[in-house]
Image: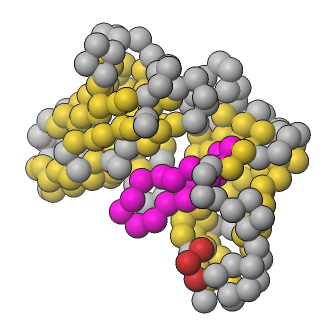
Amino acid sequence: EDKVVQSPLSLVVHEGDTVTLNCSYEVTNFRSLLWYKQEKKAPTFLFMLTSSGIEKKSGRLSSILDKKELSSILNITATQTGDSAIYLCAGAGNNRKLIWGLGTSLAVNP
Amino acid sequence: GAVVSQHPSRVICKSGTSVKIECRSLDFQATTMFWYRQFPKQSLMLMATSNEGSKATYEQGVEKDKFLINHASLTLSTLTVTSAHPEDSSFYICSAVRDIHISYEQYFGPGTRLTVT
């Protein structure tokens, strides 16, 4: 059965800290891994990773995929209180559906 | 670009009534839309996949007669919760994909909070 596992489930840090969120996947005919940020409402798209070893970067956020290890990490540097959210990871196979992890709840304290 | 809207954002209805939720892609055409349900502190649960002009594909355990999905155009999909009961109270989210054959990137609507009393 396909599954995506995220760790840690929750994390509390101070502003300015750097965090690394982990995502491991078992997805049949894996095509892509996606990261989303969910605050109070629906998820907003962060990254889609298809190729192993190529880092994607957006401001203080970056992510990379390791197909050999079936995993991905999401890094956030110099965290701010506005980064507090649930970060969701999802794997996509070729059946078009996303397999979602439970998310990592990140709290950034001032 | 890639904005998805949902209406209503919040609805309260009485047990036994039906509720329709609309999902629209505002600035792109969506060949595929997905409907999710999310309970507090839980991840997204896919309910069904909606393709324009064809019948929706429901996930195992989701009653198609209770959750009616209509994807009438490339910019609109609707979810109707029929004969709603309190256990249907949840956060319903739709997402849209531009072209599923090109990218799996899903753009989410803001969600609809349904409360059945």
Identify the image quadrant of the N terminus of chain B.
top right
Q: Which residues are magenta?
A: B34-49
Residue B73 sits inside the magenta stretch: no
- Residue at the image position 56 percent from the left and 30 percent from the top: B105
- Residue at the image position 11 percent from the left and 50 percent from the top: A14
Relative to residue B32, is residue A51 drawn left or right?
left
Rendered view: A100 above or below B10? above
Relative image position of residue B17 (x, y in whole percent) = 76, 83
Relative image position of residue A90 (x, y in whole percent) = 43, 36
Q: Quadrant of residue A22?
A: top left
Rendered view: B90 above or below B107? below
Q: Quadrant of residue B102?
A: top right
Q: How is the rendered protein coloured?
A: secondary structure
Rendered view: B86 above or below A17? below
Relative image position of residue A16 (x, y in whole percent) = 13, 41
Relative to residue B39, is residue A21 drawn left or right?
left
Residue B41 sits inside the magenta stretch: yes
- Residue at the image position 48 percent from the left and 52 percent from the top: B44
Relative image position of residue B93 (x, y in whole percent) = 59, 56
Identify the image quadrant of the C terminus of chain B.
bottom right
- Residue at the image position 26 percent from the left and 28 percent from the top: A73
Which of A8/A12 is in front? A8
Instruction: Tally the numbered discs.
Output: 0
Q: Is residue B11 visible?
A: yes
Q: Is residue B26 visible?
A: no
Rendered view: A61 above or below A29? below
Secondary structure that dominates the magenta span: strand
